[in-house]
Image (tube, rainbow, N blue to C red):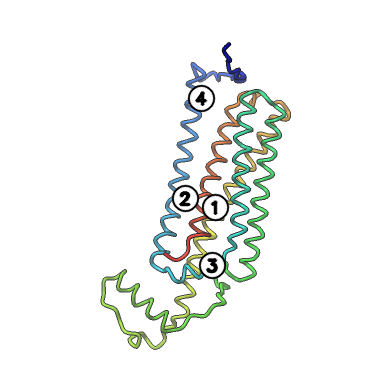
Amino acid sequence: MSLELQHPAVAPQRLSHQFEQIDQQNEIYIVGMWTFLVTEIMFFGALFVALTVYRSVYPDAFEQAHSALNVWLGLTNTFILLTSSFTAAMAVRSKMLGQRVLTLLFLGITIVCAFGFLGVKYVEYSAEFREHHFPGPNFQWSQTVSPSTAQGDLAANSQVALGVPKIGVNEFPANYQPQQLELHKRELFFSLYFVMTGLHGFHVIIGILVLSTLWLLIYFNHPTVDDYMPVELAGLYWHFVDIVWIFLYPLVYLIGKQ
């Protein structure tokens, strides 16, 4: 006696007038979406490289600034995004199988997770603003740095960056303020932190708008979402948002001094 696996049939798709075959239509949709995602990967990749380079140049300052971040809030957001990525994949599967109620359910959970991510990020940003860690004229750092340490660090950096011999501690100008230099190094770390996490949060907001629009269209049985492809493309975008955070979290929150 043989057993055959019964796979549910994929819901039928609507062929647009500008395409000859459904496979051609799907391929063009997928290629277009991946082209967009590759440009986004290059954009975030440049920021990852910038953070890595500056961390190697200013390891001590970046280590101290990195220690001010709340690792547990970042971990919470990691679990939230992983959960939302799973529910987004389930929404795509449900739409492909023509399961309207499950599609709405999984899309709704994904949207709720996205709002949860932004809520945790709001708590985290609020703490950084209270500590005056936002870059700008009001930036502050509570820990003090000894002048000898800062001067020695500047001498080492000047030798590496400019290819000149080390200069002695007593050879700095009389008006030189080493603590101000250390403050700017930490401010640089938080500048990269807010730019990278802020841009990622902006992509989360875009994802909420897209997923919410799809939810409403499916709820009201709009003909534009009879096909599963819009949900699949939105799912690809959301997986990209998730993957960026998977790289961003360890690089910003977990990796300390090199």
The residue under label 3 is: 67
Question: In the rendered view, would you say 51 is above or below 86?
Answer: below
Tell me whether circle 2 and circle 1 mark residues in contact (CB < 8 Å).
Answer: yes
Q: Are marks 1 and 3 in contact (CB under 8 Å)?
A: no
Give the mark, 4 or 1, whose residue is nearer the N terminus. 4
Label 3, label 2: how many angstroms apart (C-alpha)?
23 Å
**Label 3 neighbourhood size at 10 Å, few (<14), some (14-19), many (20+)?**
some
Q: Is residue 252 toward the left or the right of residue 72 in the image?
A: left
- Going by the numbered disc 1, the residue's amino acid type is Leu
| Vertical placement of residue 196 versus 134, above or below | above
- Residue 53 location, x and y as percent? 39, 61
Question: What amino acid is found at the position of numbered circle 3 in the picture?
Answer: Ser
- Residue 26 is labelled as 4
So how many labels did they put on this image? 4
Q: Position of residue 67 (x, y in %)?
A: 54, 67
**Which quarter of the image is occupied by the N terminus?**
top right
Q: Position of residue 258 (x, y in %)?
A: 41, 64
The crowding category of the residue bearing disc 2, from other C-alpha atoms within 10 Å (few below 14, some 14 to 19, many at least 20), is some
Q: Residue at x 39, y 88 (%)?
A: 174
- Whichever of callouts 1 and 3 sits on the residue coming sooner in the sequence is 3
Residue 159 sits in quarter? bottom left
Q: Residues within 10 Å of mark 4 (few under 14, many from 20)?
A: some
Residue 47 left/right relative to 159:
right
Helix, strand or loop at label 4? It is helix
Q: CA distance from mark 2 to mark 1?
A: 9 Å
- Is label 1 or label 3 in front? 3
Measure the alpha-carbon separation of dots 4 and 1. Answer: 29 Å
Q: Secondary structure at mark 1?
A: helix
Which numbered disc, 4 or 2, marks the residue that appears first in the sequence?
4
Question: Are discs 3 and 4 less than 8 Å apart at CB?
Answer: no
Q: In this figure, which residue is indicated by the disc labeled 1?
A: 199
